[in-house]
Amino acid sequence: MAGACAFHPSCRALHAAAPSVPTGAYPMESVNGARYDAHCDMSTDSGGWTLVARSVQQRSSTSFGWLRDTGDLADDGNVYSLDASRVGLVFDALLIGTYGTGKAWSLTYKMLPPAEFPAAWRTTYTDPCAASVIAGGACAATPYMLEHLGRTDLSDHFFIRDNVSGDGYGLYPNGFRLSTDNCEASGTMSGNQGMIFGR
């Protein structure tokens, strides 16, 4: 597999260099020289996705956010988050959803954040972002709680919600908090364990 043995700055770059590389963990080297390991989803929606966050049941208090390094990538029994800014990652697409075991998706939504996300959105909120069901969705419409991102400086959760009146919703270390757990509001994700990948 040509290109698979070289260091790349992201799963997207690795996938572009070696499209046949399977889903799994790979060593990376960011554009600023920072070495890190990344879990890459190489099959969902054309592949090239870098794991940024994964919650775990019954773990309610830990550092967790877009700009926080937490946990061990190989330890699925504990919370994980990757400091995207430290390793120079900028995303123009996100996968947000629930998982059953390990890092295998159960339900997946795709969101399209604005330019320079997440680094340029530390203290502000995005305008409404487009969201669509990628896999496992029994809900016909896009959940209204998946409209806004931002406040990437938060240290205890990944902000996701329907408006910008407060920071209390999103993915927390112990799962999604997205208001009512139904199709219209949260796409049935609220209260379940979640993951976020970026590309």
Image: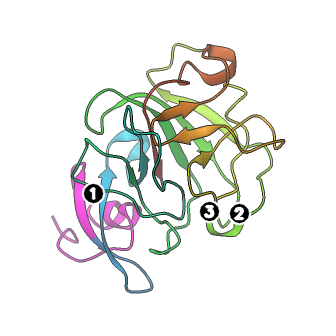
> Which residue is at 42% across, 64% downward?
69
Q: Is residue 50 left or right of residue 2?
A: right
Q: Is residue 52 left or right of residue 164?
A: left
> Which residue is at 30% across, 45% downward?
78
Camera-near label (2 vs 1) is 1
Residue, disc 2: 121
* Disc 2 residue type (three-letter): Trp
* Disc 1 residue type (three-letter): Asp
Based on the picture, tell me whether residue 18 belongs to the magenta stretch: yes
Which residue extends farthest front? Answer: 61
Q: Marks 3 and 2, how far apart in space?
A: 6 Å
> Which residue is at 67% across, 34% downward?
146
Give SS at disc 2.
Answer: helix
Mark 3 vs 1: CB contact within 8 A: no
Crowd band around label 2 with a 10 angstrom C-alpha radius: few (<14), some (14–19), many (20+): some
Residue, disc 3: 118
Give SS at disc 1.
Answer: loop
Q: Marks 3 and 1, how far apart in space?
A: 21 Å
Q: Earlier in the sequence, mark 3 or mark 1?
A: 1
Where is residue 141 drawn, in percent x and y?
A: 67, 19
Q: Is residue 112 left or right of residue 98?
A: right
Mark 3 vs 2: CB contact within 8 A: yes
The residues colored magenta run 1-27
Crowd band around label 3 with a 10 angstrom C-alpha radius: few (<14), some (14–19), many (20+): many
Residue, disc 1: 72
Give SS at disc 3.
Answer: loop
Where is residue 168 drawn, in percent x and y?
A: 69, 39
